[in-house]
Image: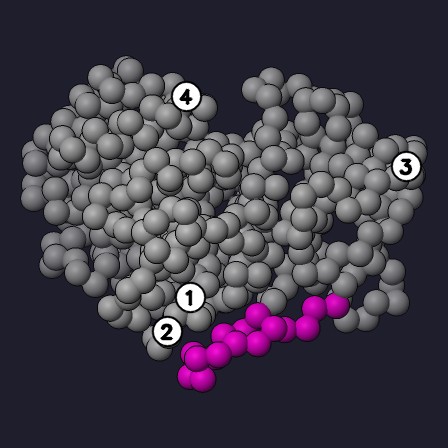
Amino acid sequence: MPARAAFDSYGMNCHLSFLGSPSWGNTDAALRWLLELGVGAVRQYLPRTDHGRAVVRRAMDRLTASGVRWCAPILLSQDVTSLDAARSVVNEQLDWLRANTDLDLLDSLTGPNEPNSASRAADWAQTTRWAMQALWEQTRKRSAFDDVLVQGPPLNMKGGPAAIAPDVAALGDLSQWMDRGDVHLYPNDEDPEYLIDERLDVLEPLHPGKPLCVSEGGYTTSIDRGYGGGAWLVPPAVASLYAPKHLFVHLLEDRTFFAYELLDEPPPYDSDDTIREAGFGLVETPSPDPRTWVRKPGFEATRRLLALVRDGEARHTPPGLRVAISNPANVPTATPADTLRSALLHRSDGKHLLAIWQAVDLYKWDRNELSGSYLPVESLPVTITLERPLPIAVYEPSLRDGPINEFTAETFTQSVGVGLVVIEIG
């Protein structure tokens, strides 16, 4: 698999149109952090007000100048009172996009976000179907948007697969009006693989046979902010260990993934919901003053991983590389079939990247005691065998910049513990 495919599969959720937000209202600061992170795509709503659009246009002009692609939600549930109303809004938004943005970097247009949320109207299923029909039909009438994907509406997953099933049944099959399905998958306090198959199975009737975008997923780190609600929290260090795995979990199944989100929200907080929501960012924002903002460990882990997989546009395929991966049979607590995962990428410079990690839970949050504890994880000694001796550089993106080890070998053993390891070969 090309390393560029890994880079292209990952994006970041932004709220550049939240002009009243103490953090997102600092548009220039938010853009500096985005560009430092080095993402190749953002998910950003296109507002309908002149001021909101002006802010988003300035921001997207800076991002697209760096080659950043745009996944653009353009419809809100409240915009859709009828099929004709939805068509009118879609046409208005398409007109603006055609006149004001680089369509070569417009990746996708999406349906309403979580239309089944608690605040939904009684006719939410019908209006969501109207929204998708209008989005598909009006977009496909315009040849300028031929290369832009139309993406389905992501549902609020509520209490999990059983709780969401009635909403899926009410909404029905939307696949005739989309190129790609859209889902939100939050792993709670667990490994990024948590309940993915079960959740996707229950959502499949919305978009049968379509490729998928996971347009939101992440971890909240609001542990020290007085949270008293029922969500799952993790420390920033744990979120940083999960972050690189999150990209690969979806990449291996050919899913695009947008992490939630770039920035925290600063205090004060007026409810448990705002405390929980405030901690999903990769940048901690203790105050509205950007000079106080600091990188969380997850920011650094993501930045390092993206730097490793970023590659040129050319999809040059180097000669194949045979790699054998094994671990000793005398390790009784874990075997490759149980926890070990791997992905082999190739770069246009002829080098290969072998990513290896364990799919294991690292932390458990007790929602009754409102406290958590680290879970024991045994490192696996993994033996890697190549066809011939080659230069090796070993990276651990969650821990540090640069390689942790460099050598030349045909066969070597690498310890794989709580974090993802990237082995550069060649």
Q: Could you tell me if the residues under marks 2 and 1 are in contact, i.e. CB atoms within 8 Å?
A: yes
Classify mark 3: helix, strand or loop: strand
Q: Between 254 and 59, which is closer to the camera in this rendering?
A: 59
* Label 2 SS: loop
Q: Nearer the viewer, mark 1 or mark 3?
A: 1
Q: Please tell me whether mark 3 or mark 2 is closer to you in this view.
A: 2
Task: Give amino acid for label 4.
Answer: Ala
Residue that numbered label 4 is attached to:
65
| Residue at the spot 52% in from the left edge and 61% down from the top edge | 236
- Dot 1: within a 10 Å radius of its alpha carbon, few (fewer than 14), some, or many (20 or more) residues? many
Tag 4, which secondary structure? helix
Please tell me which of labels 1 and 3 falls first in the chain.
1
Quick one: quadrant of the C terminus?
Answer: top right
Q: Nearer the viewer, mark 3 or mark 4?
A: 4
Tell me the CA gap for discs 4 and 1: 34 Å
Residue 237 in the image: above or below residue 128: below
The disc at residue 222 is 1
> Relative to 101, is 50 on the left or the right?
left
In magenta, the rendered stretch is 363-378
Residue at 39% of width from left, 58% of height from top?
Answer: 286
- The amino acid type, in three-letter code, at marker 2 is Tyr
Disc 3, disc 2: CB below 8 Å? no
Q: Position of residue 240 (x, y in %)?
A: 57, 55
Expressed as whole percent of the image width and height from the top left, the position of residue 23 reads 32, 49
Please tell me which of labels 4 and 1 falls first in the chain.
Answer: 4
Q: According to the image, label 2 marks what residue?
A: 227
